[in-house]
Amino acid sequence: MKIWPGTPYRLGATWGGQGVNFALFSKNATKVELCLFEGPDGNRETARVVAPEQTGGVWHIFLPDVRPGQLYGCRVYGPYRPTQGHRFNPTKLLLDPYAKAISGELRWSDALFGYTIGHPEADLSCDGRDSAASMPKCIVMDDGFDWQDDTHLGLPGTRPSFTRCTSKG
């Protein structure tokens, strides 16, 4: 699979006609992986690619072989220090907050939690189970619209009417 650096702008997955740019903001991450999926249930991981570049806290990668319809998710590495507000756990597949579409449903499982349920340290513990099978996946979308033979309707423009508000009193 070809991997190019990509650009930090636009966040999310952006189809550009020649491939897809992926950009994800995470100021404190130490590494970001893009996971690609396929199959009837979307749970067969076909590739895991490290985003090679970071610009201003935005991790980015361009994959020229990826097309609209591709299912994906992210794994983000960094410190696991819950008392300091950092809960990076790369065993948990994350949805892209800028995804334009999602496929599948959340399948409830204790593996979805970043901490181990019932552990003596409660939510300060770290759960190492992979959550991908329980997670829906993001879908790369084509934002373009082919107008084909559409024509302008030729309707005259209209101006908004304004109503003057007066108070009597």
Image (cartoon, helix red, strand yellow):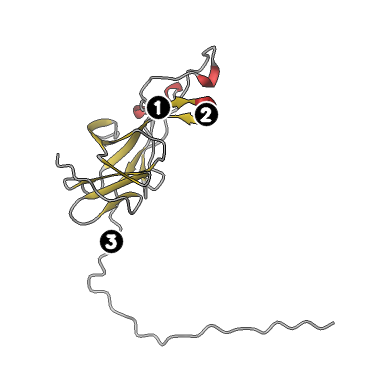
Chain-order first, disc 3 or disc 1: 1
Which is closer to the viewer, label 2 or label 3? 2
Labels 2 & 1 near each other (Cβ < 8 A): no
Question: Can you say which quadrant of the picture contains the C terminus?
Answer: bottom right
How much space separates mark 2 and mark 3, taking CA atoms? 42 Å
Q: Looking at the picture, how far across and down is residue 153, in whole percent?
A: 34, 81
> Where in the figure is residue 104, as x and y percent of width and height?
36, 38
Q: Give the residue type at disc 1.
A: Asn
Relative to 136, is 140 on the left or the right? left
- Is residue 121 something one can see in this rendering? yes
139 relative position to 115: left or right: left
Using the image, tell me which numbered label, if any, was put on residue 144: 3
Residue 107 on image: x %, y %:
42, 29
User: The residue tagged with tag 2: helix, strand or loop?
Assistant: helix
Asked if residue 113 can be seen in this view, the reply is no
Between marks 3 and 1, how big is the CA–CA gap? Answer: 35 Å
Amino acid bearing label 3: Gly
Indicate which disc residue 18 carries: none
Looking at the image, is 18 positioned above or below residue 46?
A: below
Which residue lies at the image location 42% right of the left edge and 33% below the top edge?
A: 106
Disc number placed over residue 84 in the picture, else none: 2
Dot 3 falls on a residue whose secondary structure is: loop
Earlier in the chain: of badge 2 and badge 1, it is: 2
Residue 100: x and y, percent? 37, 50
Q: Amino acid at mark 2?
A: Gln
Q: Residue at x 34, y 27 (%)?
A: 133
Residue 48, placed above or below residue 150: above
Mark 1 highlights which residue? 89
